[in-house]
Image (tube, grey):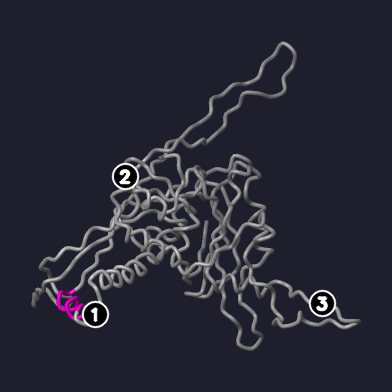
Amino acid sequence: MPDQFLTLKDITALDHLTDPAAVGLINTIVNVAPELKVILGRPIPGISYDASVLVSAGSNGGFRRANSGVQISSPSLDEKRFNCFAWDVQNSVDEAVLMKREAAGESPATVFGVIAKANMIQETIKLGRQFYLGSLVDPLGCPGMVDFLFTQRTQVDSRTGLKIDQVVDAGGTAAGKCETAWFINVGAQGVHWLWGLGRGIVMNPWMPQYGSSPDSTATNRLRQRQWNSNMFGFIGTSMANPHSIGAVINIDNTIDPVTGLYAHPLTDKLVTALYAKFPIETLTDANVCLASKPTVAGLQASRPVSNYVTGGDRGWTAGSAPVAAWPSHLPTFNNIPIIPTDSITPANQYTLN
């Protein structure tokens, strides 16, 4: 099991203790946060594991003179620990609401499902943001791509002897308008989720109990009988190879109202520049790009439009608007897929050292 790579839905379905309803909810939420679908995960027996990282390959060969030798040095290994963190989604339904809906013909299971789904969608979008921003979203949660990127830039590139640089700047500077497109290698040494204790998300049974009402305050404590449940699991992120991510930062998708042009969009030229920064080793070539829908739309707008020739005149393809096809792959980056996500939102400009 620890060597298997599974989606959250897969690992939850394999757990014989899991409520079937949990798998149904996850089937819904992975459509909200594609990070839980396209980034695979690995179940681990505990809530942490240590990865051996090859820092330097050492030297065991080279040219030499007759009756001479070559230098021998051992590889340099480093140990990195990756942890899982408790993820808890609480659900609560007022007994009065449940009885009212039952009188209207709805079963308790239907009411519970609606509440659980609404809460899970909200919290899963937050989990998706955690995947990118890590401690900037919740310091009690798992590290994100930003955390890995900052760590990456402190590591030495064995090819150049300089700090690793797998970032391209799109040039945006406007406050609250800058986005990032992430290029990620998913795999054992690359980026993946960790599912702690060998399990996915557990949906605990709904139980009646007395608790504080939503309008209760410290000075005016109010109680009610309510039905409670929660979904719980240990979730972490891992990236042993520091070359496993790259980013095009400071993408500004603001559209000029006069020209209709994007301020600083993602372009195939920027993608190519980033591709050139990845090592030639295939293990660390990114295999998926995740970006917001506005970023994908900006890429579409930056691409040339296909047209056809009628006699000596050029005309647009019949029945279609004069725009390029919606981008689904990046031909200048090994033709990897580009996946839109709502978990990437505009922020301030990134200034990296």
The alpha-carbon separation of the residues under discs 1 and 2 comes to: 40 Å
- Tell me if residue 228 is in the magenta stretch: no
Mark 1: few/some/many CA within 10 Å (<14, 14-19, 20+): few
Mark 3, residue position: 308
Q: Which residues are magenta?
A: 94-102
Q: Are marks 3 and 1 in contact (CB under 8 Å)?
A: no
- The label on residue 105 is 1
Task: Spot the residue most to the front.
Answer: 105
Mark 2, residue position: 197
Q: Identify the residue at horizontal 41%, vertical 40% (top origin).
A: 2
| Element on which disc 2 rests | helix
- Name the front one of labels 1 and 2: 1
- Tell me if residue 101 is in the magenta stretch: yes
Mark 2: few/some/many CA within 10 Å (<14, 14-19, 20+): some
Q: Which amino acid type is shown beneath numbered disc 2?
A: Leu
Sequence order check: which comes first, mark 2 or mark 3? 2
